[in-house]
Amino acid sequence: MDLIANRPSPSVQDVFADDVNPAPDLMRVESPAVGQSTDDVPIDRYFSKEWHDREVEQVWRKCWQLACRVEEIPNVGDHIIYEIVHDSLLVVRTAPDEIRAYVNSCLHRGTMLRTEAGCVQRFRCPFHSWTWKLDGTLAHIPQQWDLPDIDPDELRLPEAQVGTWGGFVFVNFDLDAEPLESYLENLPEHFAAFDLENRYKAAHVAKIMPCNWKLAMEAFVEAYHVSSAHPQVLSYYGDTNTQYDVWPGVRHVSRMISVQGVPSPSVKTTPPEKTIEEMRRDVPFFGGQPIDVAGGERARDKLAERSREKISRSTGTDLSELSDTEALDLIEYMLFPNMVPWGGQALPLTYRFRPNGDDPETSIMEIMFLFAKGPDGSHPEPAEMRMLGLDEMWSDAPELGSAAMVADQDTDNLMRIQRGLRASKKPGVTLMKYQESRIRHFHETLDAYMDADAAATHEVR
Ligand code: FES
Ligand SMILES: [Fe+2]
């Protein structure tokens, strides 16, 4: 517990102790990292092509990764294309209860079978019309007399593994990889309270980022930078008292919790009336509405109430029992290597970070909003992804609301970080022991995958 002995108070757990609707049990426990290395993390992994190429083999072709949401492919034949560096998969619903992923490359001369999402009952290559059924077996070769020795059974489309959890579809190129269920470790248990399965993708924006994919992700998994980069939130956001959890024996999952509706410990000398005034002005849940907070009352309680009312109205569900933390706070998990799903309903975000093609110095960051479905399970059409270029800002996507400004502030920094690391004469980056313990945990797992026996390379069925 040394790691948190000097953390500013109140702690997240202190705040939870006074909440009106109590936090879920698994949020009432802390698990600060134990026994992490304090060595600097070598910087070449953020720009070296050699490191990037090895990541393709050891991470992208070995780990489970998020491909899409199940509600994006509701009907048989619906498919999306999932791309990661050189690889491309057709992720397709092959039966009402079955999703499969095929290597998106024709077995004649290699043409991509599909270049965009859609719904088809056959995959027909546009070059010479070799055609496959949805189950991956060969349907037709024009003028097959000209290929008399072909064995149609050998011309099944190669596949990747597919798994689903929480309404997400995951894929894994490694046919020997552990099942998704065990890869997810404690994530399903923690998300039992949050029920992502009953959400739908209400917004989806992607942007080319001016940095390595890991730098982009690292900027979104700690709150140490908040007072420098996002000072506008400090009147209602707990940054320096954020809780960071890394569980013993858990390699792929970590968590942070930041409370809202209480000022940052770094502004606790401000008179309470002033922080409440600032909250009234800035906090999304106030919506600019006046709110009375009498002496002895906590603004957090009022905010939680207002947030519950707002979410209940928008989902048509009675959420009066929703915990204060789920109504208000930032409850952020990370699933190695590149997915960041949030719990709670205050900020129903999920991030994904990927290399931008074969370039280690740019990446694709995506922000999704997962809103609750209606009580009968109905929901609007899931949002299609809006792609922003390098020169566009997150705030060019109005569907992101107030999250856009924060992401723009981070993006400006990331451009400097990538360039600064190239200029650096210091061989490694230094990490704070507690506040950056999730980044350390990520690199420990990354190192384990990168050092694993490289002999078992990419295989397909
Ligand atoms: S390359 Fe696909 S049919 Fe020829
Ligand atoms: Fe940030």
Image (cartoon, rainbow, N blue to C red):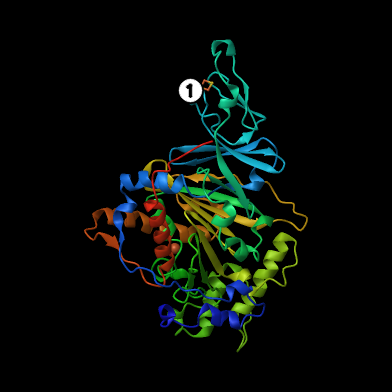
Camera-side residue of 161 and 310: 161
Check disc 1 and give the amino acid type: Arg
Q: Is residue 3 above or below residue 405?
A: below
Residue farthest toward the left in the current orientation of the protein: 425
| Residue 319, position as x, y percentages in the image | 72, 68
| Residue 289, position as x, y percentages in the image | 63, 72
* Quarter in which the C terminus is drawn: top right
| Residue 61, position as x, y percentages in the image | 46, 44
Residue 84 visible here: yes
- Looking at the rendering, the quadrant in which ligand 2 lies is bottom left
* Quarter in which the N terminus is drawn: bottom left
Mark 1: C-beta under 8 Å from nearest atom of ligand 1: yes
Q: Which residue was labeled with disc 1?
A: 109
Q: Is residue 266 above or below residue 130?
A: below
Residue 382 visible here: no
Q: Is residue 281 above or below residue 455?
A: below
Residue farthest toward the top in the current orientation of the protein: 145
Left/right of residue 382 with respect to residue 261 in the rendered view: right
Q: Residue at x 61, y 40 (%)?
A: 100
Left/right of residue 360 with respect to residue 147 in the rendered view: left
Element on which disc 1 rests: loop
Residue farthest toward the bottom in the current orientation of the protein: 295
| Residue 379, position as x, y percentages in the image | 71, 51
Camera-side residue of 17 and 381: 17
Q: How many marks?
A: 1
